[in-house]
Image: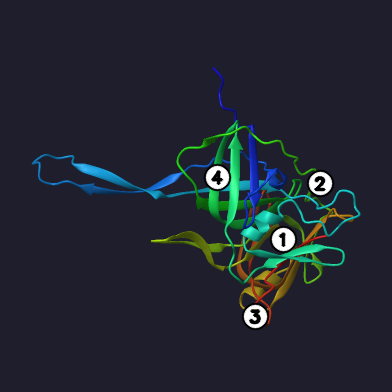
Amino acid sequence: MAKSLTDKTVVLFKYNATPTNGNAVTTSNVPFVKPSIKSKTYKDVGTGKLGNQKTYIDEHQTDTSFDLEILLRGNDKTGVAPITAPKIAELLKASGLIETVGADNISYKPNHNYVEPSICCVFQDDTKRIITGVMCDMKISGTVGEAAKATFTVQGFTVPAPIIEVNPTVTLDDNSLMIVSKVTAITLDGDILNITSFELSLNNEIKLDYATNMGEFVRKDFAPKMKLTGVKIKGDETAWSDLTSDEIREIEIVLGSGIGKTLTIVASQSKTSDMEENDDDGTVAFTRTFDLQGDSTGQNQFEIIWS
């Protein structure tokens, strides 16, 4: 008897459209789509007996939430087309980022307008689940000695039972991985930091609007933060003084090198919101959290650039 195999998984994703085989997503995890059917319990009282709780369901409100973990890569391994969209571009747009093509790069900043819903298809060993009305949240993280990754939390609508359909044939992303190493440049106002890990979180506020003739997930707001963890240098107490000041810092993280193989994250209006220290096997480690604020226009909280 053949068993369903988890590694036989294919994910297709498209912003504001139905994905095709050309919209394959290369994940480092195996996503499982678990449908959640809206249900309510009630009691039929009057039999003179106990245990009369019953349940009814709203089959039209079947939603799901799951994560797609994706190792970050460059956008053009040939080194001749640095304005090529990265393979995760559709997920970035579904998370509420807007794409801008420059002369020698392609970048993504927060979109302050309505985010259109997306469609995701997850195949698993010749079964298919379709998730519609998708909204995403996003985290980008990196630990020294490892490949940086993006985690997208997908929310949308589906149906309880999958469709029987053969897995499609797709081409996966084979661009250069973005490795965090000792030569990775992470700076604060231009000063190089000794960082062991970082995390950029978008923190989308996603709400379900459910009414007659309406059922959609909508991004209502977002509150981006950056967390830097590293090795404290003796005598450097700047972070603690920043907690009690209005000092604004610029964070820049540069991953990779070379044309089509470089990823840069810039947050120019970063305000320290939390600071903590702890023991790391005999040395002091710090974790510093920043609120990523908008500029004078209330926009441009951060930018992610492939070049």
Q: Are marks 1 and 2 in contact (CB under 8 Å)?
A: no
For marks 2 and 3, give the one nearer the viewer: 2
Residue at image x 45%, y 41%? 160
- N-terminal-most mark, 1 or 2: 2
Q: Position of residue 117 (x, y in %)?
A: 57, 59
Q: CA distance from mark 2 to mark 3?
A: 41 Å
Q: Amino acid at mark 2?
A: Asn
Residue hosting label 1: 232
Q: Judge the density around disc 4: few (<14), some (14-19), many (≥20) Cα neighbours within 10 Å.
A: some
Q: Secondary structure at mark 4?
A: strand
Q: Secondary structure at mark 1?
A: loop
Q: CA distance from mark 1 to mark 2?
A: 34 Å
Task: In the rendered view, tell whether residue 78 sits above or below residue 124.
Answer: below
Residue hosting label 3: 246
Residue at image x 65%, y 54%? 91
Q: CA distance from mark 1 to mark 3?
A: 22 Å
Q: Amino acid at mark 3?
A: Asp
Q: CA distance from mark 3 to mark 4?
A: 47 Å
Q: Position of residue 234 (x, y in %)?
A: 74, 63
Screen quadrant of the C terminus: bottom right
Name the mark on residue 130. Answer: 4
Task: From the viewer's side, name the closer residue of 247 and 42.
Answer: 42
Q: CA distance from mark 1 to mark 4?
A: 47 Å
Residue at image x 67%, y 46%? 20
Residue hosting label 2: 175
Q: Secondary structure at mark 2?
A: loop
Q: Are marks 3 and 4 in contact (CB under 8 Å)?
A: no
Q: Secondary structure at mark 3?
A: loop
Screen quadrant of the N terminus: top right
